[in-house]
């Protein structure tokens, strides 16, 4: 029997698993595969070069699935900010009703989405930010522990404590993000009050993921020790794959005089990171990966992955029930 949580009810999905937004990865083929498998797939708006391209991606996704899916819009510091408003309007006009937001000052976006009757999932790395998002009226909070790929914030709080604190402080349903890849992880998150889990790196390593096969195989061959933090000295920390480029960035940052962004710009350019996924050279540029790589041992289809997670979750519940002398199944 399926696991029913506030998340599955709200989003009308079978499995309480969300595929978080990922630059260059959250494209129609992967999004549709996740949604068709019972989770929630999420398109990454800024992977598309402009709002009109996002419209086409939404239309393409609809041709691939009749299930719910969402759109991610991440607000990050930028010299030339993207047309966030244009992306949001395009998605609304195309009928999208579920949005994942992340980053700085999401208030105007959240207000716009709520005025249009949408469901908003907002990513947070601290309880302080989560409570602020609650006051904005978001529907679901995605609580990102220090284990996550990408930007874990600057307070370095691991998911175990962060999720337990969320259960103490938050009234809004929340999902767990950072370090999740299997059914045991799902049940551990639910034991800490979560209504489901968000997975990024795990979905990168699936058949339908658009990244190069060599990168998928590199993820399988890697361990939880194969990531590194960059931009620590710039207070814009990002967890990325440990390769020649990221280690050079860390070396420059650790100099007594530190490093200015202008010195790092070419090394960390998004264009180089995109090429990693296209040509399969893991050392070509910076690319995001979480310590959850230590749990990833294969490259399944999204359907195989989510069915396995359901089975593992049920098995974990049965094992825990036996500890309490309970024999009832899901």
Image (cartoon, rainbow, N blue to C red):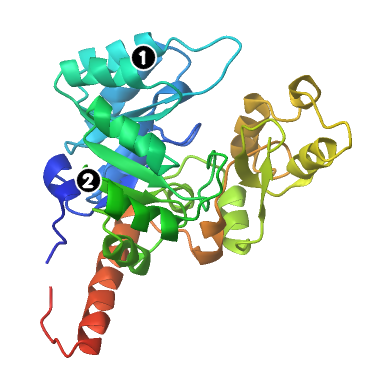
Which image quadrant: the N terminus? bottom left
Q: Tell me residue 2's x, y (percent).
A: 14, 62
Residue at the far right: name it.
256
Which residue is under mark 2? Answer: 173
Look at 30% across and 58% down and name the residue there: 306
Q: Nearer the viewer, mark 2 or mark 1?
A: 2
Q: Is residue 155 visible?
A: yes
In this rendered view, identify the residue nearer to me: 63 or 87: 87
From the viewer's perspective, is residue 199 above or below residue 44? below
Q: Based on the displayed image, in which of its 4 quarters is residue 282 positioned?
A: top right
For residue 225, side relative to residue 29 (left or right): right
Report whether 174 appears left or right of 228.
Answer: left
- Judged from the image, the secondary structure of the residue bearing numbered disc 1 is helix
Which residue is tagged 1?
Answer: 87
Q: Quadrant of the C terminus?
A: bottom left
Within-10-Å neighbours for mark 1: few <14, some 14–19, many 20+: many
Q: Which label's residue is closer to the chain start, 2 or 1?
A: 1
Residue at x 35%, y 38% (from the top left corner)? 130
């Amino acid at each position: 029997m399926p696991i029913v949580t506030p998340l599955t009810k709200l989003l009308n999905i079978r499995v309480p698993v969300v595929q978080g937004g990922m630059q260059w990865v959250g494209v129609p083929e992967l999004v549709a595969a996740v949604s068709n498998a019972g989770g929630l797939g999420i398109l990454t708006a800024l992977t598309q070069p402009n709002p009109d391209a996002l419209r086409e991606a939404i239309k393409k996704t609809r041709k691939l699935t009749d299930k719910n899916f969402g759109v991610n819009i991440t607000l990050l510091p930028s010299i030339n900010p993207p047309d966030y408003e244009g992306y949001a309007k395009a998605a609304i006009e195309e009928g999208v009703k579920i949005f994942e937001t992340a980053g700085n000052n999401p208030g105007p976006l959240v207000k716009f989405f709520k005025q249009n009757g949408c469901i908003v999932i907002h990513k947070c790395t601290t309880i302080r930010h989560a409570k602020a998002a609650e006051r904005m009226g978001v529907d679901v909070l995605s609580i990102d522990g220090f284990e996550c790929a990408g930007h874990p914030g600057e307070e370095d709080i691991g998911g175990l404590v962060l999720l337990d604190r969320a259960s103490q402080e938050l009234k809004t349903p929340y999902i767990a993000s950072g370090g999740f890849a299997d059914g045991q992880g799902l049940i551990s998150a639910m034991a800490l009050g979560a209504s489901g889990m968000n997975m990024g790196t795990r979905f990168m390593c699936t058949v339908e993921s658009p990244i190069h096969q060599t990168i998928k195989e590199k993820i399988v061959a890697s361990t939880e020790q194969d990531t590194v933090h960059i931009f620590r000295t710039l207070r814009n920390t990002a967890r990325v794959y440990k390769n020649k480029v990221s280690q050079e960035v860390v070396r420059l940052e650790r100099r007594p005089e530190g490093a200015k962004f202008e010195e790092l710009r070419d090394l960390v350019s998004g264009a180089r990171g995109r090429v990693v996924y296209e040509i399969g050279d893991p050392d070509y540029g910076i690319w995001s990966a979480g310590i959850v790589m230590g749990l990833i041992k294969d490259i399944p289809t999204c359907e195989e992955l989510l069915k396995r997670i359901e089975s593992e979750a049920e098995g974990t519940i049965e094992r825990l029930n036996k500890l309490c002398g309970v024999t009832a199944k899901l």
